[in-house]
Amino acid sequence: MIDRRALIAAALAAPPLALAGRAAAAPVTLSKPCVISTWDFGVAANQAAWAVLSKGGSALDAVEAGARVPEADLKNHSVGRAGYPDRDGHVTLDASIMDAAGNCGAVAGLEHIAHPISVARRVMERTPHVLLVGDGALQFALEQGFPREDLLTPESRQAWQDWLKTAKYKPAANSEVDTYGKGAGGAANHDTIGMLALDAKGDLAGACTTSGMAWKLRGRVGDSPIVGAGLYVDGAVGAATSTGVGEEVIRNVGSFLVVELMRQGRSPQEACEAAVARILARKPETKDLQVGFLALNTKGEVGAWSIQRGFSYAMADVGKQDRLLPGGSVY
């Protein structure tokens, strides 16, 4: 019988690259201020965030501004207003935001509002709560002055109708970037943008926003709006965000795990690798899925690691604002 506890312990004790089928790029350290984000479309998001950071703006303002870019991008079917719907044709959005002091806000299952990241910030700043969901989140957003919109675009509607012909549900690894800007095709797109920033004052903040898995069951919520799963920030240590199949991240409280490992002395890269190792050790069948982590500590050191090859991340600091790197992976 397999001793799962022993497997997990061995994975976490292993040298950083012991499980690596494909090595990560050389460790990266960015200068303050800086911002990093998941996937190729993180480049444009970073540039919006950099416009805030380069003028002395806060990390919190920067990640909100950056996350709003893919939320508004009609070519992006995994985030925001052009996101693919659930199997009943409803576009539902999830988002979370968190600052260095541990203040956080989130929304889940939000319909008819194009910028859930901004609603999440209002939850953080104007309510005593952390997470609002469904109709309550919509009611709050409307009360805060956000316009109500029909988010099911013609392209997304066509993709959904094409999917209904077979109604087969099988999320595909890295589909969020593989299908970006390629039109309706019914792809099982399923992801998010996670963004982490360190401002000139040394304060961290993070944001995470998504339309979730295409063709999901109505009411399904992934890791993105769950503080500690899709996003976690500790101003004394660092910040982390996740990407991929949210259920596996939630089961392991992934982003919190990465930050806690950094607190214990791991580098961001080592922490991301150890978190992926734990997921695989606890549930080996996840090797056929995609989960990735991106991390940034208070020194500006960056880490990125995933189960499957194909995860990419974008970075910006004073030296260059459009860097895009491949993340290392186990397979």
Image (cartoon, grey):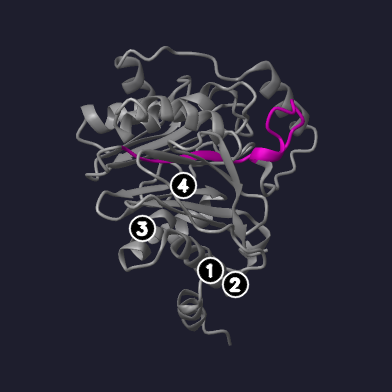
Q: Which numbered tag is attached to residue 78?
A: none
Secondary structure under tag 4 reads: loop
At label 2, the amino acid type is Leu
2, above or below 121, in the image? below
Q: CA distance from mark 2 to mark 1?
A: 7 Å
Pointer 4 residue: 223
| 230 drawn magenta | no
| The magenta segment | 176-199
Q: CA distance from mark 1 to mark 3?
A: 15 Å
User: Which residue shows up at 31% across the image and 37% down it?
Assistant: 199
Nearest to viewer (mark 1 / mark 4): 1
Q: CA distance from mark 2 to mark 4?
A: 24 Å
Q: CA distance from mark 3 to mark 4?
A: 16 Å
Neighbour tally class for label 2: few under 14, some 14-19, many 20 plus, Cα within 10 Å? some
223, above or below 92, in the image? below
Pointer 1 residue: 277
Pointer 2 residue: 19
Neighbour tally class for label 4: few under 14, some 14-19, many 20 plus, Cα within 10 Å? many
Side (left or right) of 265 relative to 24: left
At label 3, the amino acid type is Val
Secondary structure under tag 1 reads: helix
Residue at the extreme left of the image, as rendered = 128
At label 4, the amino acid type is Asp
Pointer 3 residue: 259
